[in-house]
DNA sequence: GCGAACTTGCACAGTGACGTGCAATTGCAC
DNA sequence: GTGCAATTGCACGTCACTGTGCAAGTTCGC
């Protein structure tokens, strides 16, 4: 009857904190050592190995959580939305809410060793986006010389660029979400005015 | 009277080949060891140290060369071009010609240790682009909710995304340049039709 | 052909990280 | 307060990589 999967003692709290700190630390430096992570979590290196058998396992857990969160946000945001442009707008806005917590994904995605696994796990999410973009291109809502899969890459990298801009203080996190969304839409060929209006509508309604 | 800076014997040829191979190898894996690089260049590790005193020095040389090449291409392409949109188009097309040889920059840019130096060295190039974007935004040629510096980030990352798409075979390198240019322009708020026409004009003229 | 520059093939010390073992200690839970 | 799980502290062994030293080739220019 006791909850096993949810935290129920200091052990679980530690595990949770290690994961959170590891995320932040690896984001700062993708090569952060187990010792750096452990210290940052206020714990000894040996303890981390008590929770995760290897560095690989720790990162793997992190990636799984991040991908799951992103997929949830994406799926929830565009449930029952027919118009491709609106779907993209909602999706980007929703992802933005949580994505900067998970910039680790993008940072790690650039690294060679781990890249394979991440790509695989992100595949379903990307596939959704590709289908959405294809639909929009067919309908003429979008317009781009790039094929849908390439456009999906562009969208991902574009979000990352805006995140970096936020990091560097070029704009505030508050306005960044909507700005990013508008830019994603215009990059897909939606007229700037249309994109701006659409984003205003969608984001003001909640 | 003898040429010192230009290659004049097998030593220089080796040095050149090491640099070329290192670029490719580091692109594949930013953590490639000196041994991997040496072997790939058909040479022994010790020899590499004969040309470059340290790993750091090798990478530094690489980065310097890449930045110089990019700056040249950019400056040459938009010499005497008044219209911001056309200047962006010419610049992106010119950079594209050589940029995928230097994807290393982007790969390394993601890494923490080296990132500082690269950022600094890219700063003047970025500054040019920011000024150009500002001019276009003022004139109303561009239209974006993002401030010019953030838009510059977006453009950089966008090029990288298209490069990756090429890597993955989603589109051919031949068409990628123009497609990338169109996308950069539309992301800056230029109407899709205008962007397409402009790029067609500019790229057909040579 | 000769000499000088370049290259090779080792061997070495230093470093930093990973993953593991174990005894001692701490601190919740009950 | 006692017991048990978790945490700590330290000690290993291993591995991969960096940068250097040096003696023995090799190759090119002249």
Image (spheres, coloured by chain):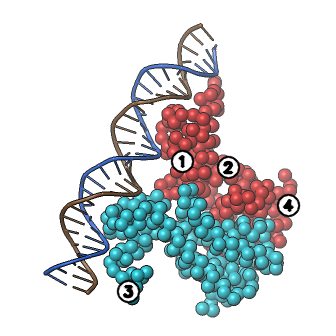
Chain colours: A cyan, B red, C brown, D blue
Say which label, 4 or 2, has the lower sequence index. Answer: 2
Callout 4: SS: helix
Gap between marks 2 and 3 measured at Cα: 58 Å
| Cβ–Cβ under 8 Å for marks 2 and 3 | no
Residue C30, horizontal then vertical, whole percent: 26, 87
Labels 3 and 4 share a subunit: no
Q: Which residue, given by chain and number where applicable, does mark 2 sit on?
A: B101
Q: Which residue, given by chain and number where applicable, does mark 4 sit on?
A: B201
Q: Which residue, given by chain and number where applicable, does mark 1 sit on?
A: B32
Question: Does residue A85 lie above or below A147 as drawn?
Answer: below
Disc 2 or disc 3, which is closer to the eye? 3
| Cβ–Cβ under 8 Å for marks 1 and 3 | no
Callout 1: SS: loop
Residue at horizontal 61 percent and vertical 59 percent from the top = B126
Labels 1 and 4 share a subunit: yes
Tag shown at residue A45: none
Q: Quick one: quadrant of the N terminus of chain B?
A: top right
User: Please, which chain is the residue tagged with disc 3 on?
Assistant: A
């Amino acid at each position: 009857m006791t909850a096993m999967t949810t935290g129920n003692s200091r052990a679980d709290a530690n595990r949770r904190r290690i994961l959170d700190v590891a995320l932040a630390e690896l984001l700062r430096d993708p090569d952060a050592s187990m010792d750096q992570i452990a210290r940052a979590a206020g714990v000894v290196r040996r303890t981390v190995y008590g929770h995760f058998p290897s560095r690989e396992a720790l990162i793997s857990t992190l990636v799984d959580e991040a991908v799951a969160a992103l997929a949830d946000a994406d799926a929830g945001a565009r449930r029952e939305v027919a118009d491709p442009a609106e779907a993209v707008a909602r999706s980007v806005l929703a992802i933005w809410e949580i994505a900067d917590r998970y910039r680790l994904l993008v940072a790690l995605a650039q690294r060679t060793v781990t890249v394979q696994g991440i790509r695989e796990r992100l595949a379903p999410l990307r596939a959704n986006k590709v289908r959405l973009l294809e639909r929009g291109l067919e309908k003429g809502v979008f317009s781009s010389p790039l094929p849908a899969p390439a456009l999906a890459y562009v969208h991902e990298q574009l979000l990352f660029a805006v995140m970096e801009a936020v990091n560097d203080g070029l704009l505030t996190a508050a306005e960044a979400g909507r700005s990013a969304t508008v830019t994603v839409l215009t990059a897909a060929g939606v007229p700037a005015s249309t994109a701006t209006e659409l984003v205003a509508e969608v984001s003001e309604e909640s």
